[in-house]
Image: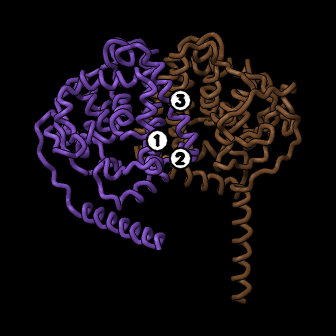
């Protein structure tokens, strides 16, 4: 009986998702007019305890603040040309993928946060960004969407979306992470590689204020965006317990928050108790 | 007549499915009896231009050589429980995933070729391994299995229908995997720009050092060498190969150095070489096994 109920719920949820998607696609995207030479950052709504529940939106917005670039946020669920939720448009031109967005704004606005660091350090920072965005990320999504529910964390309540969608999202994450490779490991193995990445980050950062020293480099955006999810959006789960084993990474998160998000409290929903004003 | 035709189709389809299933899913029963402490390295067989057509078996086998771990090759091309290759058996235990294999061997045998590195250096080494295996690798797959598969046809050591099927199958798998990964959503030129950034970063960090982290080799050299050898030897006339040879000469020199140091018998393991010898079942570094305890990988 329970199995049949679950099955019916999943099918209903899936049909609901399909219906919503079809309706949305049917609606023509109305092209709005934004101020010239202003970066319009499309992202989903604010998060409960950090400005975004997705590491890439937080990475990108933090970067725009680090580089002191003119931008405004549009909190919508309009997807980019690549099917992802974080993208920008500048003077009507659309750019998808957080790394390409950063490269685009660097060229457009003549920004180079990495200038002044040695070639070797810049290369190392790029490698750190790849490790964080292409590997640590997958341990985070598996923990959040697949493993945390086993530890009693109600992720739909924590992230404020309808619970019926959870099985679909979980299935989606399982499929994507299996294709990528990390999803083929056992939970214990995923935890192990998560720790290896966090250990590497911690050792690389050491006592430094930021990744490469006293001032930020481009990769600080990526690292902060990802670690913030462990630190603020793991809701007492394994991800949070993991990062707390690395005090210098926790201090780094707090430092980045103070430095680039003085208006942090206006950019979060405080556990969905109020609307973010920014 | 119709019944015979249907029966024929069903029989042929069943045979095909059985053979494909065996190829993909059948676990190898150990074909080699080895003394305790000898690793059995299962891989897909030697390549026409390098000891493997894939970077991961080359990485793993280079690690075994770097640490002088006794090992034997099984080139029967069977897949692990994670549907991946290479994988190993060590004293009866099977371990899948090249990096888990390395970690297992390090724990069981107490070897660590990166012990001379500082904690910060170890971090950078790990980061570059991830850059290489979780990012650059996919740009190479997209290059090889994109519109033009002429490069990969030169490298896969099959012919006729088997070659066609292998390429068709791998193309489907890679399309699925790269879409799931994310990189498959980019245009060809965007993927190429990612590849250039990664290869340049590897070259910039290597600089004029003999090995990736300094004057002595370390574990990350196995991963970097595996991938760079893939570009230089297994991707003839590809954009990656041309870019490295024309713009990143220190990587070319580095690969030659790694070959001399850990693969003095390189030619014996290259199918198109006159010196090629089938080493299936041959034990390397035969010595007393050293087992130091438990490891989480089982």
Q: Is residue B247 visible?
A: no
Tell me residue B220's x, y (percent): 60, 24
Q: Are marks 1 and 3 in contact (CB under 8 Å)?
A: no
Residues at discs 2 and 1 both on one chain: yes
Secondary structure at badge 3 equals helix
- Where is mark 2, residue-wise? A183
Left or right: where A113 falls relative to A150: left
Which mark, by number, is residue A196?
3
Rendered brown, the chain in question is B
Q: Residue at x 47, y 26 (%)?
A: A127
* Marks 2 and 3, the one that precedes in the sequence: 2
In the rendered image, residue A216, in percent from the top left (x then y), is placed at 32, 18
Q: Colour of chain A?
A: purple
- The residue positioned 72% from the left and 30% from the top of the image is B105
C-alpha span from label 1 to label 3: 13 Å
Task: Indicate the chain on which mark 1 is placed.
Answer: A
**First of labels 1, 3 by sequence position:** 1
Instruction: Classify residue A205 by image quadrant.
Output: top left
């Amino acid at each position: 009986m329970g199995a049949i109920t679950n099955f019916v719920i999943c099918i209903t949820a899936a049909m609901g998702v399909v219906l919503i998607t079809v309706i949305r696609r049917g609606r023509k995207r109305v092209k709005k007019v934004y101020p010239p030479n202003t970066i319009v950052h499309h992202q989903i709504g604010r998060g409960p305890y950090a400005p975004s529940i997705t590491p890439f939106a937080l990475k990108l917005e933090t970067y725009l603040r680090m580089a002191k670039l003119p931008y405004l946020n549009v909190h919508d669920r309009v997807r980019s040309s690549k099917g992802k939720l974080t993208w920008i448009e500048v003077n009507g031109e659309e750019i998808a993928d957080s790394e390409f967005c950063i490269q685009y704004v660097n060229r457009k606005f003549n920004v180079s946060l990495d200038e002044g660091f040695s070639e070797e350090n810049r290369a190392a920072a790029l490698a750190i960004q790849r490790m964080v965005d292409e590997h640590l990320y997958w341990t985070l999504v598996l923990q959040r969407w697949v493993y945390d529910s086993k530890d009693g964390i109600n992720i739909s309540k924590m992230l404020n979306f309808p619970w019926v969608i959870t099985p679909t999202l979980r299935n989606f994450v399982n499929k994507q992470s299996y294709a990528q490779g990390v999803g083929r490991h056992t939970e214990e193995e995923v935890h192990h590689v998560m720790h290896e990445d966090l250990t590497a980050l911690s050792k690389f950062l050491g006592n430094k204020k930021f990744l490469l020293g006293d001032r930020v480099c481009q990769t600080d955006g990526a690292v902060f965006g990802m670690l913030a999810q462990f630190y603020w959006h793991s809701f007492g789960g394994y991800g949070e317990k993991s990062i707390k084993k690395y005090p210098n990474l926790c201090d780094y998160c707090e430092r980045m928050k103070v430095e680039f998000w003085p208006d942090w409290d206006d950019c979060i929903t405080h556990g969905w108790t109020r609307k973010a004003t920014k | 007549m119709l019944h015979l035709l249907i029966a024929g189709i069903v029989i042929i389809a069943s045979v095909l499915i059985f053979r494909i299933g065996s190829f993909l899913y059948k676990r190898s029963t150990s074909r080699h009896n080895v003394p305790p402490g000898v690793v059995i390295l299962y891989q897909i067989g030697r390549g026409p231009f390098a000891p493997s057509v894939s970077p991961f078996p080359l990485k793993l086998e280079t690690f075994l050589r770097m640490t002088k771990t006794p090992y034997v090759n099984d080139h029967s091309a069977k897949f692990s429980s994670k549907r991946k290759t290479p994988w190993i058996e060590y004293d009866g235990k099977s371990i899948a995933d090249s990096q888990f294999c390395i970690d297992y061997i390090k724990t069981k045998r107490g070897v660590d070729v990166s012990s001379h590195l500082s904690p910060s250096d170890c971090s950078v080494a790990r980061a570059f391994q991830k850059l290489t295996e979780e990012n650059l690798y996919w740009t190479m797959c997209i290059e090889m299995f994109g519109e033009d598969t002429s490069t990969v046809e030169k490298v896969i050591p099959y012919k006729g229908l088997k070659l066609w099927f292998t390429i068709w199958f791998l193309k489907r798998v890679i399309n699925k995997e790269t879409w799931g990964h994310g990189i498959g959503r980019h245009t060809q030129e965007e993927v190429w720009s990612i590849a250039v950034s990664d290869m340049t970063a590897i070259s910039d960090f290597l600089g004029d050092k003999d090995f990736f982290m300094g004057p002595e080799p370390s574990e990350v050299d196995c991963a970097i060498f595996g991938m760079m050898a893939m570009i230089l030897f297994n991707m003839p006339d590809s954009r990656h190969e041309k870019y490295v040879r024309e713009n990143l000469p220190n990587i070319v020199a580095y690969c030659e150095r790694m070959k001399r140091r850990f693969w003095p018998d390189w030619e014996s393991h290259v199918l198109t070489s006159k010196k090629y010898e089938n080493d299936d079942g041959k034990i390397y570094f035969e010595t007393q096994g050293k087992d130091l305890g438990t490891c989480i990988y089982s």
